[in-house]
Image (cartoon, grey):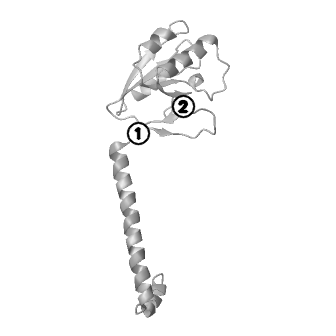
């Protein structure tokens, strides 16, 4: 049923103008898909994995990045803060396969040392308040911690983590 309209094209097969259009269309399609293939292969081999996200003007610094098995992701946690669940996240992720996770525990007084112990340009999973979009009213030390993280070019992923409760324990 769906190919029935193509039978009508047979009536025009003897028309010279249609054959010319068909040849040019075939060349155009071949070039188009050739370019798509080359772009795909080139992006696979030459891309950095970073994609800039449009945040409607909020900040030009937000990025999305890939973490591979060879990478190390640092989980920055402040256990003295009641809502911080970094330890739980580390316990859930450390044996999950994929990237290596390193737990970096800090305090309100030691944040500078803790952030300095993380190598520059590292992937860091931090508390939710480290995201510029959180809207949280930050204490002066938290503002300074955010500024230090930005100056060290951390690829920061700020989360508010809630541990999963296994079925049957609800």
Q: Whole-Å distance between the Cαs marked 2 and 1?
A: 15 Å
Residue at 62% x, 29% y: name it: 133
Q: Give the residue at mark 1.
A: 49
In the depicted view, which residue is nearer to us: 85 or 99? 99
- Residue 147 vertical position relative to residue 48 in the rendered view, above or below: above
Query: Would you say 33 lies left or right of 61 here?
Result: left
Residue at 34% x, 43% y: name it: 46
Query: Would you say 103 lies left or right of 80 here?
Result: left
Residue at 64% x, 17% y: name it: 138
- Residue 47 vertical position relative to residue 118 in the rendered view, above or below: below
How many C-alpha atoms fall within 10 Å of the one at disc 1: few (<14), some, or many (≥20)?
A: few
Residue at 54% x, 40% y: name it: 53
As helix, strand or loop, the secondary structure at mark 2 comes to: loop
Q: How many labels does the image show?
A: 2
Which of the image's four quarters has the C terminus?
top right
- Residue 63 vertical position relative to residue 147 in the rendered view, above or below: below
Mark nearer the N terminus (2 vs 1): 1
**Picture coordinates of residue 166, whole percent (x, y):** 48, 33
**Picture coordinates of residue 7, whole percent (x, y):** 44, 89
- Residue 47 vertical position relative to residue 124 in the rendered view, above or below: below
As helix, strand or loop, the secondary structure at mark 1 comes to: loop
How many C-alpha atoms fall within 10 Å of the one at disc 2: few (<14), some, or many (≥20)?
A: few
Query: Is residue 39 visible in this depiction of the protein?
Result: yes
**Picture coordinates of residue 104, whole percent (x, y):** 44, 16
Q: Disc number at residue 104?
A: none
**Picture coordinates of residue 34, whole percent (x, y):** 36, 62
Q: Give the residue at mark 2.
A: 61
- Please identify the residue farthest to the top as the structure is shown: 109
Q: Quadrant of residue 121?
A: top left
Query: Is residue 87 visible in this depiction of the protein?
Result: no
Answer whether labels 2 and 1 touch (C-beta < 8 Å): no
């Amino acid at each position: 049923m769906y190919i029935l309209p193509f039978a009508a094209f047979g009536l025009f097969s003897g028309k010279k103008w249609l054959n010319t259009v068909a040849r040019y269309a075939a060349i155009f399609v071949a070039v188009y898909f050739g370019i798509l293939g080359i772009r795909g292969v080139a992006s696979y081999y030459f891309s950095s994995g970073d994609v800039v996200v449009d945040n409607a003007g909020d900040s030009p610094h937000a990025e999305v990045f890939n973490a591979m098995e060879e990478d190390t992701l640092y989980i920055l946690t402040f256990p003295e803060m009641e809502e911080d669940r970094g330890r739980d996240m580390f316990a859930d992720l450390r044996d999950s396969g994929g990237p290596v996770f390193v737990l970096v525990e800090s305090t309100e007084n030691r944040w500078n040392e803790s952030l300095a112990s993380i190598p520059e340009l590292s992937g860091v999973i931090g508390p939710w308040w480290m995201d510029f979009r959180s809207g949280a009213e930050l204490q002066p030390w938290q503002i300074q911690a955010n500024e230090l993280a930005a100056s060290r070019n951390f690829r920061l992923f700020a989360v508010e983590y809630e541990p999963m409760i296994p079925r049957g324990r609800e």
